[in-house]
Amino acid sequence: MSVRSLGLELHCRCIGTESKPIGRHIEKVELIPANSHCDDTEIIATLKRTGQEVCLDPEAPWVKKVIQRIMSNRRR
Amino acid sequence: MSVRSLGLELHCRCIGTESKPIGRHIEKVELIPANSHCDDTEIIATLKRTGQEVCLDPEAPWVKKVIQRIMSNRRR
């Protein structure tokens, strides 16, 4: 079991966020609520094909739409 | 790099969903959009302390509220 899986991440994971709307390239999204180690919600998208992890801005309208689309089970 | 990180998960990960509202115990949430290997959006929450993974129902009102709360950066 890794330190991370024990919830012992001791700082924010994101240092910046992606501004381009990359919704269609997203394989999955991780939502990490604000906690004692990071004041802000963090959204980390994993991209299809490359598996690259990209931080998204929870306030960005396109990010909110991507989350809504996933929740409503609509494919793009 | 694992098979999973390459996006090659070949089936749904969830076989059932948690019905109890466990929002306050959630450390993070993974959203997996419907894809060629699974017809439905899957939501997998990792619980604080235990690190246990629990599948949530994207249609359940309490689950939608949990996601909205995380997105709006409100702590519980």
Image: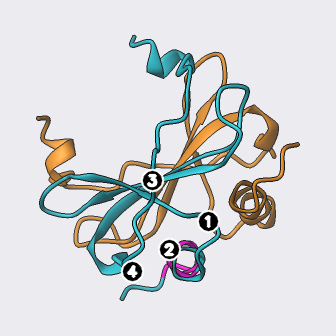
Chain colours: A orange, B cyan
The part of the chain drawn in magenta is: B65-73
> Would residue A40 appear left or right of B58 to someone viewing this image?
left
> Would residue B71 appear left or right of B33 to someone viewing this image?
left
Chain holding disc 1: A
The three-letter code of the residue at mark 2 reads Ile
Labels 1 and 4 share a subunit: no
- Residue drawn at x 45%, y 12% as measured from the top left: B3
State yes or no: residue A38 in magenta: no
- Residue A2 point in image, percent of width and height: 14, 35
Q: CA distance from mark 3 to mark 2?
A: 23 Å
Residue at image mark 2: B70
Labels 1 and 3 share a subunit: no
State yes or no: residue B66 in magenta: yes
Number of residues whose C-alpha sits closer than 10 Å to that of mark 3, classed few (under 14), some (14–19) or many (20 or more) = few
> Which-is-in-front pick, marks 4 and 3?
3
Label of residue B16 in the image: 3
> Which-is-in-front pick, marks 1 and 2?
2
Label of residue B21 in the image: 4
Q: Is residue A24 above or below residue B1?
A: below
Q: Secondary structure at mark 3?
A: loop
Dot 4 and dot 3 residues touching (CB under 8 Å): no
Dot 1 and dot 3 residues touching (CB under 8 Å): no
Please identify the dominant SS of the magenta region.
Answer: helix
Number of residues whose C-alpha sits closer than 10 Å to that of mark 4, classed few (under 14), some (14–19) or many (20 or more) = few
Quadrant in which the C terminus of chain A appears: top right
Labels 3 and 2 share a subunit: yes
Chain holding disc 4: B
> Which-is-in-front pick, marks 1 and 4?
4
Q: Secondary structure at mark 4?
A: loop
Dot 1 and dot 2 residues touching (CB under 8 Å): yes
